[in-house]
Image: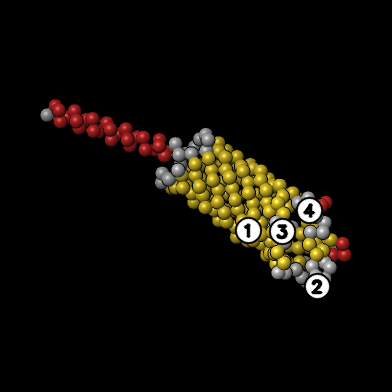
Amino acid sequence: MLRISRSAVAFAVVVTLAAGAAPTLAAQKKVSLFAIGGYYIASDLYTGVGANTNNKVVLDDSPTFGGRLVFMSQPRFGIELNYMRAVSNLHTTNPAKPLDGNVSLDQIDISGLYAGYNGTGRGYVSLGLGTTAFTPHIQGVNGSSQWRFAWNVGVGFMADVGQSMIARLDGRYRGTTTNRQTGSGSYCDAFGNCYGYASMIYSSGEITAGLGFRF
């Protein structure tokens, strides 16, 4: 009976240690890969130049999608590699000079994340640098991609869904330099109406949600 009791105690100890180690092993997983989708908030990117000065080009808000790879080097600090894509339709404010088409916006960023605390649910702030590519597709003519320096700030919330899955919600603001002084004649249509960047800094925002796998 004594031998059986010792075996039972040893088994119970092993089970208890394993159960206690499971959350620890989950917490040691520092890399997460997310699929992201949401809503892209655009602003005026182009405007008329020369005789076409009063004709502004408006980008429509649109869906956006992409992915994010996160490495949490510390419980509260992490690094994120982000790619997002949106395709926004455009139209002019002067109906006498219409401009049909869309602009693809590809965004690549590397950001730092700081979480308020490390728990099942945690809020965080982000700050990053990267690049945005504007690729116009206007009236059947595909323009070349123009990569520009960009920066972003954001806030978000992550919540564990089991030991390996994570859900997240983000809001971000992005500023992109346009080199307006070198792009005054970015595009001219068949009627001689020319367009350039509307400002030195193109502003955009996004509200996204995603689901990730921790490994």
Q: Which residue is mark 3?
A: 144
Instruction: Indicate the amino acid at tag 4.
Output: Ser
Q: Which of the marked residues, 1 or 4, is nearer the chain's N terminus?
A: 1
In front of the other: label 3 or label 2?
A: 3
Instruction: Indicate the amino acid at tag 2.
Output: Ala
Q: Residue at x 55, y 51 (%)?
A: 67
**What kind of element bears circle 2?**
loop
The picture places residue 95, in percent across and down from the top left corner, at 78, 71
Instruction: Indicate the amino acid at tag 3.
Output: Ser
**What kind of element bears circle 1?**
strand
Q: Residue at x 30, y 34 (%)?
A: 16
Q: Which of the marked residues, 4 or 2, is nearer the chain's N terminus?
A: 2
Which of these two is toward me, 70 or 123? 70
Q: Which residue is mark 2?
A: 96
Label 4 CA crowd tier, 10 Å (few <14, some 14–19, many 20+) = some
Cα separation, mark 1 vs mark 4, equals 20 Å
Label 2 CA crowd tier, 10 Å (few <14, some 14–19, many 20+) = few
Q: Which residue is mark 4?
A: 199
Which of these two is toward me, 169 or 49? 49
Which of these two is toward me, 117 or 148? 148
The picture places residue 87, in percent across and down from the top left corner, at 64, 61
Q: Quadrant of residue 39?
A: bottom right
Instruction: Indicate the amino acid at tag 1.
Output: Ala
- Residue 156's tag is none
- Residue 86's tag is 1
In front of the other: label 3 or label 4?
A: 3
**What kind of element bears circle 3?**
loop
The picture places residue 178, in percent across and down from the top left corner, at 76, 51
Q: Residue at x 45, y 39 (%)?
A: 29
Q: Which of the marked residues, 1 or 2, is nearer the chain's N terminus?
A: 1
